[in-house]
Image (cartoon, rainbow, N blue to C red):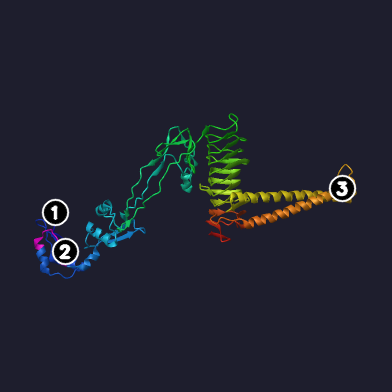
Amino acid sequence: MSIKHDGTFQLFYKEGWACLTVFPPEKGGRPVYVENVSGRIQLLGIPSVRQQIIRDIIEKAEGLPSKLIQWPDGEKLGPEITTSISEDNMSASVTITSERQGGEPLSEEKLIKALKEAGVVFGLQEEALASILRRKIYGQPVLIAHGRPPVDEETARIEYLFETDRGKPFRELDYERIDLKELNFIQNRDEGDILARLLAPITPEDGMDVRGNPLPARTGGADSALKAGEGTLLSADGREITAQVTGNVKLTTTGVIIEPLVTVENIDYSNGNMDFKGAIDVQGRIADGFTVKTDGDIQIGKSVSKINITSGGDMVLKAGISGNDEGIITCGGDLYAKYIENATIYCKGNIYVEEAIMHSNVMGEKDIILSGKRAEIFGGQMAAGGSLKCKKLGSINEPQTEVHLGLSLADYKKQEALEEKIKITNSEIDKTDLQIRQIKAAIKKGGAAETPLEIPQDKLSTALTQLQDKSVKLNTQVSEGLKDLHEMKREQKIDENAHLTVEQQIFGNVSVFFGSHRWVSSGKATSKTVLMVKKGKLLEKGSE
């Protein structure tokens, strides 16, 4: 038995009118009745329509829209289109809500009209428009237009065929993904390799934002010129730099250079100490007690311990250093290390550490940044001319931990040397005072009672006088030293851009200095602590 389909109708808004479409029934099916349509008209709030008009449309049942009556309020039942334009007018998105019963369905014309009314007249994305209509994307923003940025004139551009910012991959990774294995400072190139070249000039082209505002391109860009440094050759037309020798390529202030490169498996008794004018790539380890020195870069694959390493350029310790209080590193550029433990570090650039600095004396001209999963510092002394950033400062065992920030490395070394000199002099005063007390006791007993030999009283008196003169001189030196130290600290210029940022916790027995300004940890946990000096005052930000 076949199913007989009844007649149906649609009542909807279109272009200011209430429209009715009636579809006829199949043979034997029930037709549409006037009462059905009238009830729907009343439900939708359409103005009253004469029943004869409705009856005529039902009788025809052509399946085509027929205008019933003007209905301006019906537009409110259509889809709501909200347009959002970015602050720089370079992109626009739309969020659409579906039409209600009787509302006019979303159409391309309606969407484009809404965009124009919102001021979007350029950069319409045809694919996005078609996708909205086809997939009926409602309730979420969709990028519908974006502007065309201007193309500035460049008379010539340089393409470097090597990594010019070698530390960038390490510095830009997130905390949990830091990995020194991703860092490779040594970029070996063979003789004849192309290192850099000039690309064709770029013709200026004006842009336009989504509102139709023109964006003029800059013209008259500065000429770019290739600079060929040591170990490289500039072509006759000035458009290419090639390697004259095999070595480590890098970009310096003097231009592209190739520095000699030596690659060794290990440095130990098989090859001895190394002093080299170029880059050194140690793929393995450096044995205890050995010295490595170069005016270029150094990259070391495995952990080192009781060594003395000096580089004129950058240094990468892929597996860190456990110095046993004897490891010394002097770096002329930036230093990258997995960890630093019981070592002394002097660095003229930035210090980037993956995991931890433990019980070490670390001094850097610029910033000290710990960016690994642990990122903790405890024990020893840190000094940075710039800022320090880590997750944890100090530890639960509360070893003495000092941080000095905002002073140049030269100023900090001067201060440290003077403080050490005062400390040594005070120790000498203690020894001298002990000798004075011993001689006074001997004189009081009538001789050198505590020695097997008898020393005449006159010699004891002479020795006492000499020691007392020495004590006065030493005390004078300490007083003058303390005065100089006070004056030095008073004249010190603290970099007000320097700051301490601890993301998670500062433990007890931690002191932070900005010159003469001192901050001491209470030992209480904080979610984040930031310290800085502004206009001569120490400021602290954080939450208990």
Q: Which residue is mark 2?
A: 19
Circles 1 and 3, Cβ within 8 Å, touching? The answer is no
Residue at 61%, 41% in the rendered image: 328
For the view shown, which residue lies furthest in the top direction? 270
Crowding at mark 3 (Cα within 10 Å: few <14, some 14-19, many 20+): some
Q: Is residue 400 above or below residue 256?
A: below
Q: Nearer the viewer, mark 1 or mark 3?
A: 3
Q: Nearer the viewer, mark 2 or mark 3?
A: 3
Q: Amino acid at mark 2?
A: Cys
Amino acid under label 3?
Leu
Q: Quadrant of residue 536?
A: bottom right
Give the residue type that dot 1 points to: Ile
Q: Is residue 428 left or right of residue 338?
A: right
Q: Quadrant of the C terminus?
A: bottom right
Q: Residue 128 colored magenta?
A: no
Specify whether residue 68 is painted magenta.
Answer: yes
In the rendered structure, find residue 3 and report the number of the disc placed on it: 1
Asked whether the viewer can see residue 158, the reply is yes
Point out the tag, 2 or 1, that comes first from the N-terminus: 1
Q: Badge 2: how crowded within 10 Å, few (<14), some, or many (20+)? A: many
Q: Residue at x 9, y 62 (%)?
A: 59
Q: Is residue 269 above or below residue 183?
A: above
Q: Horizontally, is 524 left or right of 218 in the view?
A: right
Q: Which mark is first along the chain, 3 or 2?
A: 2
- Where's residue 203, x and y in %? 33, 48
Numbered disc 3: secondary structure: helix
Instruction: Give the residue number, with chain letter if any, for mark 3.
Output: 460
Could you tell me residue 236's position as x and y percent? Answer: 41, 36
Q: CA distance from mark 2 to mark 1?
A: 29 Å
Q: Quadrant of residue 340 in the image?
A: top right
Q: Write down the region rendered in magenta.
A: 58-69
